[in-house]
Amino acid sequence: MTRLAAAPSPSVRVRAPGKINLSLRVGPVADDGYHPLVTVFQAVALVEEVTATQVAEGAGISLTVDGPQSGRVPLDASNLAWRAAELLAREVGLAPDVALHLAKGVPVAGGMAGGSADAAATLVACDALWGAGLPRAELHRLAAILGSDVPFALLGHTAVGTGRGHLLTPAMSRGEFHWAFATRDEGLSTPAVYGRYDELAATGALVPSADPAQDTALMQALRAGDPTALGPALHNDLEAAALDLRPELERTLEIARNGGALGAMVSGSGPTVAALARSRQHALAIAATWTAEGAADAVWCTTGPAAGARLL
Ligand code: C5P
């Protein structure tokens, strides 16, 4: 008698990138509670990998996770990957039966959109696993429902984002940029940072504006692949609010600047600090100084731009 090995459950693996906002310009808060943005996204080579595996009918969604800082990731329906699987299933009229595994490579709750990358990767993975075959534009529509940063994790590379950050236009960028990141164990809540931004705007401490014309030098630096020109063009309107909530980040910025970073800023809503370096060695040197000075709980070095969500 021949014994047949049990057929492995079909599974699909998808990789999606974290991001930084090379420029983040925030307009005055609108009636829906969101702020109109003009932002320039760059995807970086810190990536999330989502594996979606077929399970028995009626088994529902399950979620497991590994990777640095994975202990801080919720494993229930509040996880954006879980919500992405639910949304897609509802949209295509299927039962949400899937085992999801997240291999996390993006800092958790650091303003680098790791959770959004999980959601984007889950949409692509479940679409393939369930044979839904949704057009890319439809995946983008679902992505925007899940969160403002999810569409960019689908697209990757470099793009200008408007609206809530979800309306995307790809932008030209040449070559590779080297980044060092300093992360903190204690995250910052995005709504809290926007809330402090509104308070600072109300007192006149800052003036909300989201004028795309302000980023001409940055777009030129990207097209030229010139990190020396990109450094001074980096801009984050939320930085003042993040620093107000977490003043210790000032020292992290200062250490990067003293270490010759071409530019240093809070990434997105923080608390991650991003430093643009001249080379990989330079990025490693900045990261080593952060560690030696106790100015980060963890340090990361990588490059950008990187590809958007794609099947492996
Ligand atoms: O879209 P997402 O769920 O990622 O946004 C999280 C929170 O960030 C929102 O609830 C809102 O408070 C704030 N936000 C904002 N303006 C944006 C994007 C996000 O005020 N353009």
Image (cartoon, rainbow, N blue to C red):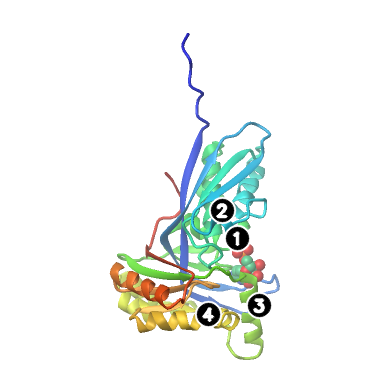
Q: Nearer the viewer, mark 1 or mark 2?
A: 2
Name which residue lies at 54% across and 63% down.
Answer: 167
In the figure, residue 156 lies in which quadrant? bottom left
- Asked if residue 258 is positioned above or below residue 305 in the image, the reply reads below
Residue matched to label 2? 119
Label 1–label 2 contact, CB within 8 A: yes
The residue type indicated by label 2 comes to Ala
Q: Secondary structure at mark 2?
A: helix
Asked if disc 1 and disc 3 are in contact, CB closer than 8 Å, the reply is no
* Amino acid type assigned to the residue bearing label 1 in the image: Gly
Determine which residue is flagged by label 4: 239
Question: Which residue position holds label 1?
Answer: 147
The reply to whether the residue tagged 3 has its Cβ within 8 angstroms of ligand 1 is: yes
Q: Is mark 1 within 8 Å of ligand 1?
A: yes
Q: Amino acid at mark 3?
A: Gly
Looking at the picture, tell me which residue is in the foreground, 269 or 71.
Answer: 71
Estimate how packed mark 4 is, as few (under 14), some (14 to 19) or many (20 or more) residues with alpha carbons within 10 Å.
Answer: many
Q: Mark 3 or mark 2: name the one nearer the start of the chain.
A: 2
How far apart marks 4 and 3 lie (CA) works out to 13 Å
Q: Earlier in the sequence, mark 4 or mark 3?
A: 3
Mark 2 / mark 4, whichever is N-terminal: 2
Labelled pair 2, 4 in contact (Cβ < 8 Å): no
